[in-house]
Image: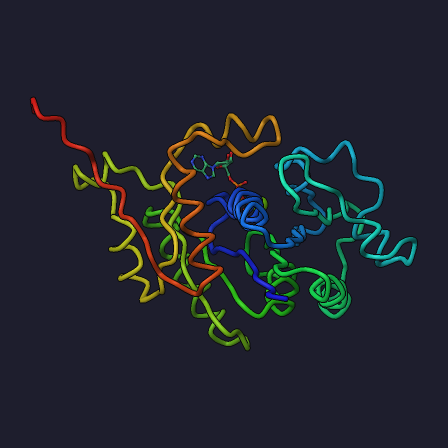
Amino acid sequence: MRKIVITSGKGGVGKTTITATLGRRLSADGFKVALIDGDVGLNNLDVAMGVESRVVYDMGDVLAGRCRPFQALVADSDSTARVLPSSIDSADVSAQAFRGIVDTLADAFDFVLIDCPAGIENGFHRAVSSADEAIVVTTPSASAIRDADKVLRLLSTYNLKSISLVVNRVRADLVAKGEMLSAIETAKLLHATLIGIIPDDDVITIYQQLGKSPEFAPSKKAFSLLAKNIESNDRVVIETARRRRWWR
Ligand SMILES: Nc1ncnc2c1ncn2[C@@H]1O[C@H](COP(=O)(O)OP(=O)(O)OP(=O)(O)O)[C@@H](O)[C@H]1O
Ligand SMILES: [Mg+2]
């Protein structure tokens, strides 16, 4: 029933990764989860989740009336989540049509997560106006923060119940050396509600090639905490601090 868009200002900061991994964590916690690829024209989510070879219908088929939204859902092999793939030939999907699909799915699922495309063009509007809640993803870099700031302002003009922030790719070693802003500092700069801190974790990229989320990885606990925060509207975060070795 909850419709959450995962968005960002700058591209490549981890929206698709967070949509996929968060969806899997929510489904591991027993929730029914549908993931929608809002990046119409460029399918990403099905590839990141490793289900692209099993796609029969996609959003374009739903919109053309060739199938119903539920028929187009692909079962994730790594969780109970379902994925609605985007299509490469439906670049002019209207916001209204997209919202219709989201609403139909929302009736049958506890969570519908929408993976937003990069930028603030049509695709952004389509995805955001179909959701009730927004999560903005940023990395702690200056350019990503600047773009996140713009997007947070833009989001405040939509009728959303909540807008929160996830800081991705945090490197504790660089934060400790003062070479990277901490997630808490990033959230303060943006005056945003921080609900997740995800460390930079090479294992994520390696597993993504296999279409899976890592079970034993530094980021696993961070994703579990993010899922719990969303489930219970909480804000518990653990700042990744450098572990000091005793001989240093
Ligand atoms: N926490 C992380 N640690 C390490 N690598 C990460 C992390 N999060 C994302 N990545 C990697 O960063 C790259 C970009 O991530 P992703 O595709 O999720 O970004 P995006 O915001 O969806 O991009 P786009 O704006 O193009 O849709 C991917 O190769 C992904 O594996
Ligand atoms: Mg993406």
User: Where residue 153 sits in the image (x, y, percent)?
Assistant: 43, 70
Q: Residue at x 25, y 47 (%)?
A: 181
Residue 55 figure quarter: top right
User: Where residue 159 sits in the image (x, y, percent)?
Assistant: 55, 77
Q: Is residue 240 left or right of residue 145?
A: left
Q: Residue at x 50, y 76 (%)?
A: 157
Q: Is residue 56 left or right of residue 201?
A: right
Coloring basis for residues: rainbow
Residue 168 figure quarter: top left
Front residue of 84/129: it is 84
Tell me: residue 205, above or below residue 131. above
Residue 235 figure quarter: bottom left
Q: Residue at x 43, y 38 (%)?
A: 220
Front residue of 21/80: it is 80
Tell me: residue 94, above or below residue 217. below
User: Where residue 127 sits in the image (x, y, percent)?
Assistant: 63, 62
Quarter of the image that includes the C terminus: top left
